[in-house]
Image: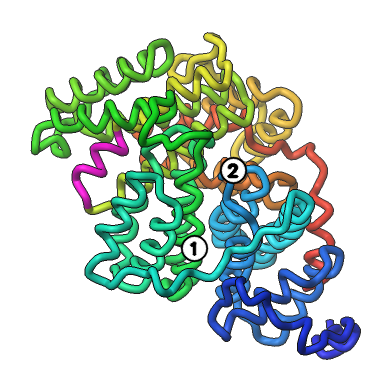
Amino acid sequence: MDCLGVLARLPRVSAEEAKLPPKSVQFRPEIESLVRLIEDTPRERLLEEVAARIKGGTTYREVLAALFLAGVRNIQPRPVGFKFHAVLVVNAAHLASQNSPETDRWLPIFWALDYFKNSQADQSRKGDWKLAVVDESAVPPADKAAELFASAMEHWDESAADVAAAGLARAAKPQEVLDRFCRFGARDFRDIGHKAIYVANSWRTLQTIGWEHSEPVLRSLAYALLQHETGNPAEGDAEADRPGRRNQELLKKLPAEWLHGKPDAGATKALLKTLREDSWEQASNQVVEMLGRGVAPESLWDAIMAGAGELVMRKPNVVALHAVTTTNAMHFAFSHTTNDETRRYLLLQNAAFIPMFRTSSGADKGLQIDDFESIAPKANGADAVEEIFADATHDKLTAARKTLAWLDANGDAKTFIAAAQRLIYLKGTDPHDYKFCAAVLGDSGHMSETLRNRYLAASVFKLRGSGSPDSALVARTRAAL
């Protein structure tokens, strides 16, 4: 495609039209023009216009940054889901891109570009919204930003949190920002885990596109984390807030050496049973008891991840799916925060959230991830993986059982993972396809081998089968590039 020829065919834009509204955030000059291209180009022409920019020298990192920032500026992060998946899915699309063969590298990103235009139109129908410029007169000095941010978040004070988030972006080190935000992302069960997901994915994406873009992202994130129903949560007793308040007290009971316990498969099995059958209070209590007697946190994370995966087997709906994506986000925060108290809090909160997801999803008492039977595929080697994903199109349980048998016999998770990822970007039509696949394939690497195979097998219930039709965007993207 001739870049100059494409640009020549675009409608002329006057200088006045090119100006942003005075109350709208503007990004750094080197990225603003690309963001505007994504915002202003009609959906039916966007992929071709971005392809022309790429051929003219625009880099992958620049496209990723502009896509993320266009979503932050144009999509209201409340509720933290629905149309806001245009922002939440960017990191998952990036991961899919990084794990793709070179010939397919742009497919996930171009899918996300198209999805942004869909969400932008949805936002317009529901009322135009733009991330406003920050009140510069109220931005706190560097030595006050962290204290004022914590106070504003504790009191659910939106205007104070907005300027404090801007102050943090300008003054704090990235690690300090993560430590503070991941605590508030995990404190309540509103929006079925999307708050924690936004924290983790913001951090991941900023690590790729550059911290210089952090201020609008952190302001959007603070606004999202303060999403709530009528009435200030600090003055109420909503069910969504109860685990956070109770676990804040329970974490004080953990011994100083709680991180240094020993792996215990029996404890994993016992906690998984609790997550399957009992209340969130009992789950939190059991985590405290097990850590207190020297069980390694990794054994408890095995149970939490497996419990989330089991919900997808038992009730493969969107709520159960978010048990997996939320667990992925909270485990990421657990692994990357440097604050010991926050790390304890994240583990207790995630354990409490799984029974809440179970109740919210309506999961029955059917399949159990730790004892469903395997069935050997008829084919061998790579052909067996093809057989599994062919079955996944119409018979998820059979595909899961064959996956388990194949993984137990071969131990080759990489081949399975590569096949699953390729089907997502060739056939995925929903942001949850990308988010779920990224979460499962990421967390499986942190699990013990026995449960890892069962967890990957359970994921088949929400992965794409090879019989699904290809996304219409695949051919269009390849033609554009």
Q: Callout 2 environment at 10 Å: few (<14), some (14 to 19), or many (20+)?
A: some
Q: Residue at x 57, y 32 (%)?
A: 321
Q: Residue at x 82, y 43 (%)?
A: 469
Give the quadrant of the C terminus.
bottom right
Q: Is residue 33 visible?
A: yes
Point out which mark residue 217 bears. Answer: 1
The magenta stretch is 339-347
**Magenta region, main secondary structure:** helix
Do labels 2 and 1 touch, CB within 8 Å? Answer: no
Point out which mark residue 79 bears. Answer: 2
What is the quadrant of residue 266 in the picture?
top left
Which three-letter amino acid code belongs to the residue tagged 2? Pro
What is the quadrant of residue 12 in the picture?
bottom right
What is the quadrant of residue 90 in the picture?
bottom right
In the rendered view, tell whether residue 282 sits above or below residue 137: above
In the rendered view, tell whether residue 373 sits above or below residue 65: above
